[in-house]
Image (tube, coloured by chain):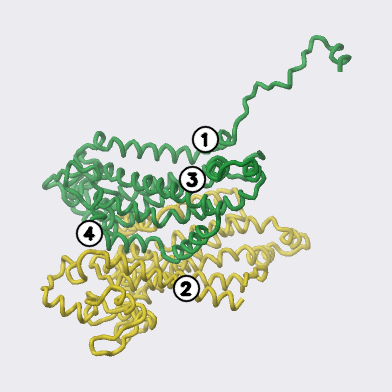
Chain colours: A yellow, B green
Amino acid sequence: MATYFLKRLLWMIPVLFTVALITFVLMHSAPGGPWDRDLSARQVDAATQKVLNAHYGLDKPLWRQFVAYTFGDFNQEDKFVCGLMCGNLGPSYRVRGRTVQDILFEAPKDKSSLQSKFGYSLRLGFFALSMAAVIGIPVGIFAALKQNSWVDYLSLFIATAGISLPSFVMAIFLIIIFASTLHWINVIPRTWDDIKGWILPAAVLGFGTMAYVARLTRTSMLEVLRQDYVRTARAKGLHERVVVYRHMMRNALIPVVTILGPSLAALVTGSFIIETMFSFPGMGREYVQAISRRDYSMIMGTTLIYVLLVSVANLTVDFLYVFIDPRIRLEE
Amino acid sequence: MAEIAGSQPDKVLPNLTRLNVRGRGPWQEAWGRFLRNKASIVGLVIVLFFMLLTVFASLVAPHSPLKLNSGKSFLPPSWVEKSATNKTGDPQFLLGTDTLGRDVLSRVMYGSRVSMIVGFVPTFIIILVGTLVGLMAGYYGGRLDNFLMRLTDIMYGFPDLLFFIIALVSLRDTWIGELMSGLFLLFCALAIVNWVGVARLVRGQVLSLKEKEFIEAARSIGVKDSRIMLRHLLPNVLGPIIVLTAFLIPNMIITEAILGYLGLGLKPTTDPQAFFVTSWGSLLLEGQSAINAQPLLLLAPAICVALVVLAFTFIGDGLRDALDPRMRGTQ
């Protein structure tokens, strides 16, 4: 099994490399250099552009720039600067003097690392995921136990809507209902230290996952319900509660647990629209702003972090799978 | 037999060797099952409605989607007495007006054009390419198959939306990005990412089908490979492909809405001759930037996206139930 996971871990390297290559090629096929793409900013004159290009190594041939980005290269003072290999995502072209990883992972002074842009997004993702699990799993179980009742039909309908509708359409409806019409909450809270402001973004973000969790739990409970060991448990006179908690839920939740990992990755990577809507100070909004500012190193760095997150999440799930369900054996 | 028949001469036995019931093929059976599904019929009606809107937008729209009505910006929908900006709705503008005083209803109608076309055109390309490559990869195996598998592995690691964003951001200002006011690039990006999934699905189906006896029989009597693929394999994988199509279309529409919302979809135009004036995604972006002045601006495009997506989902669910091979009778 160790070999299997080692193989999977090593496979992440070519995937990341290819993604970096595709992104790099696409970015560099855009017309113009990084200094004249932002129309809103002040234009940089030709002489300054030349100095800037030399400083950032943009005057070198493309292949060398890519090598410098992924592995590293000697800078103007003949000092070796390590690239992606060492976790260096390169300088931001918009915020001068700071690297991409500084902007994303460095918290403001005297704050914990959870206050960084990445930390904010991660916490929002966790919050959304916990909401999805805490509401979705009981709803799914209840719907399965009361199959074909109105509770079942209602939850099934909401689940179908939640799965098929994109989260930002849900967000629009919820904002119009709760903020514009009922005035219960502010769309953009004054501070993000208060948990109240987090509820709506997290609920919107987690709604699709919640619907998916609920439907999956229901299906898998219905399957378990018909198993022989459940009949045996009932036949030997166990209390219904014990049958549900010990015999059914333990087995029914295996597929649910396994989707939680990719869901977290999807929530963190999919949050950029929700973050922008609620002006949430996370990585996603930074990404969207980088798009409108055409901050290429920022877009590329964020993309790579997202891809890494997705790969790690998928790997974790496979690991959890083996851990939870002893019936599963992976091929070596 | 003769004795029994003779004892009851007035009763004629029906001729059981020839039935008057017409046999129905598996496709007719599936169609019948589909028509009995109420939700998918509702979905079909909604989709047809929007398709008609797409074609006849210029005839149905009450105003020009580009006409600026000065002094009439941010009007709420006509039934609203008093909006956040203290304006009363005007019956002339049923869904109100936007930042520049353009009629929202007309803009939403024109927006359906882009959304429906983005739903159908890339899906058509995706299905065509994906099916062809999947058939060949599954049937021949070997190098093409290997390449397909490695490609999917990488594609699965690359979140779709991120790829679209990067491709559109970097190629938007090149000549490809200018074609069809930016729609061509969008079609290409959507097709490049999604055909792989279709190819993989078809490949999987073909792999299990090609071991079956009827394929072996066809091969043994010397049927050409291309004919085996198109006449024997393709009809058998058509069911899953049709279901997948119904789920791909809303996916494309959602993606367009998201990208438009990020300002990356259709390029805005002021040309009254242009066929593609605006899209639901662009309307959402306009609504979002004016959310404090007139939050209801967001409502119309959001409802349209939601309606169409749900309609396609219902159709897809109906098709899946109708075509599910486990429900299909043995052949």
- Residue B205 % position (x, y): 57, 51
Disc 2 on helix, strand or loop? helix
Rendering quarter of residue B64: top left
User: Callout 3 environment at 10 Å: few (<14), some (14 to 19), or many (20+)?
Assistant: many
Q: Earlier in the sequence, mark 3 or mark 4?
A: 4
Contact between marks 2 and 4 (CB within 8 A): the answer is no
- The x, y position of residue B288, in whole percent, is 26, 57
Name the chain under label 4. Answer: B
Q: Position of residue B281 (x, y in %)?
A: 30, 52
User: Tag 2, which chain?
Assistant: A
| Residue designated by label 2 | A12
Name the residue beneath numbered marker 3: B316
Q: Is residue B297 left or right of residue B216?
A: left
Q: Are marks 1 and 2 on the same chain?
A: no
Which numbered circle lies on residue A329?
none
Contact between marks 3 and 4 (CB within 8 A): the answer is: no
Q: State the residue position of label 4.
A: B173
Q: Quadrant of residue B142?
A: bottom right
Point out the image quarter for the C terminus of chain A: bottom right
According to the image, label 1 marks what residue? Answer: B35
Q: Can residue B238 be seen from the camera position used here?
A: no
Q: Position of residue A238 (x, y in %)?
A: 74, 64
